[in-house]
Amino acid sequence: MTEIHFYRGLRTIGGTVIEIATDSARCLFDFGSAGLDAWQRPVNPRPDKRVYDALRTGALPAIDGIYDHTDLCDLPLDPYDEDAKRPVFFLISHVHIDHIGSLDYLDESIPVYMTRKSLRIYQTLCELGDFEYRPHRNCVALDDGDWVTVGDIRFRALPVDHDIPGACGFEIVTPDGRIAYTGDFRLHGFDRADSLDFVRAVQGADLCISEGVTVSFIEDFDAVIPTDELSERSNSEARILTEIGAAAGLAPGLVFLNVYPRNLERLRRLPELLRQHDREMVWEPDTAFLLESCCGLRDLSVYTPFEKGERSRDRRYITREILQSDPGRYVLQLSLDNLLETLDFSGCNPLYLHANGVPLGDYDPAYRQLLDFLEMQNIPFLTLGCGGHAEPANLKFLLETIAPRYLVPLHSLTPEKIKIRGSQQILPPENSVYKLENGKLI
Ligand SMILES: [Zn+2]
Ligand SMILES: [Zn+2]
């Protein structure tokens, strides 16, 4: 018998936690945060009660057998047991905070599987101190397409295109049926072929659990005509790069570039692209570290005022004075945290180029503040970018290619809109349990 528990993340963008349980194993995926930030500071976490507090406040799902005995204090949940009759393990589709943000809170010895590329990024982010609690100890690397068996559950990670390297979907097989989980995916990035290969590989799955981010923002998914092509209007990673290059080429002075630092595939291509426009890309040290560690780049130019650690011989250091003396030759990566650095370049004809950096959009109050600040400083603002999720027409194509018997849309504000011909739509409430028997969902 296979049971599928839908714990959370069913009507939110992120925070998906689902369990597939058989008589001999328990497979959970993903484990992101959708609620840990619910408390705006200054409510401080209590260092000795992080897991307990997160469970008491609903930031973590109350699930038996996945938390450490001591961390639980007196909460009435079964702790993780390494020798349990049914082994428990997690799958992580990619290293975005809404998919791994709560990993620090699991019992440290639970096996957590992710792709080799994801693991590399996760370890680098841990080195950078990106996770506020503790790095997870027992992470296991998966090679693309290789089957792994735990009890009577078999699974494999298949790469998909997303705005972070290492992203994958999963195919999970139990004696009762075949399940496909898409993770986050799209067709407009550099790895669109991966998403196409994924949907073909999991074609005919009994159950498909799919993200549906972009459908949150359209009226009518039924009217969408499915296609694997990119629409005239839609931006692709390739087009964004061309536009960034063109903007940097035309700008008269220094360009500040606010990019999403985990979109490493886009970042990796920037130095070479900007060289063609006679510009040198100058990085914040943490981003340079990610590019060195995860993409093997060397000789990156790093902005001296932001370097807190020791200087590395593999980097070229660029001082403030160098930028000021020849501003038209450089592009400086500038996160929101470092915004005040712009104050030293008012005489350098600066341009602020926003390409999917934080704040991501006008739903974040910080976005308005950023625009006001730049206006006050007379710095022109240009925004270019594309998202990590399949456009509705591409999503429909991908789902219709999988053509599952049942479709559970989630990771969307409006999952009910996501229906495809030939598949029965299921909208599980939070904490509901379904049975999978002979490929039928009950
Ligand atoms: Zn996501
Ligand atoms: Zn994502």
Image (spheres, helix red, strand yellow):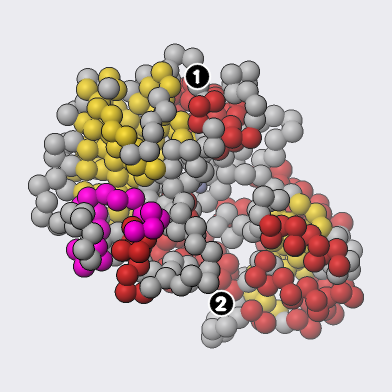
The magenta region covers: 56-72
243 with respect to 263 (left or right): right
- In reply to whether residue 285 is colored magenta, the answer given is no
Residue 149 in which image quadrant? top left
Q: Position of residue 19 (x, y in %)?
A: 29, 41
Mark 1–mark 2 Cα distance, whole angstroms, equals 52 Å
**Which residue occupies 79% across, 60% down?**
371
**Which residue occupies 70% across, 39% down?**
235
Q: Position of residue 276 (x, y in %)?
A: 76, 57
Residue 29 in which image quadrant? top left
Where 251 falls versus 414 (above or below)?
below
**Which residue occupies 38% across, 22% down?**
406
Q: Position of residue 3 (x, y in %)?
A: 23, 33
Question: Tag count in the figure?
Answer: 2
Residue 314: assigned label: 2
The front one of 250 and 441 is 441
Q: Is residue 221 visible?
A: yes
Indicate the secondary structure of the residue bearing disc 2: loop
What residue does disc 1 label? 420
162 with respect to 240 (left or right): left
Q: Residues within 10 Å of mark 1 (few under 14, many from 20)?
A: some
Q: Residues within 10 Å of mark 2 (few under 14, many from 20)?
A: few
The front one of 47 and 88 is 47
Where 282 falls versus 266 (above or below)?
below
- In reply to whether residue 63 is colored magenta, the answer given is yes
The kind of residue tagged 1 is Ile
| Proximity of marks 1 and 2: CB atoms separated by less than 8 Å | no
The kind of residue tagged 2 is Asp
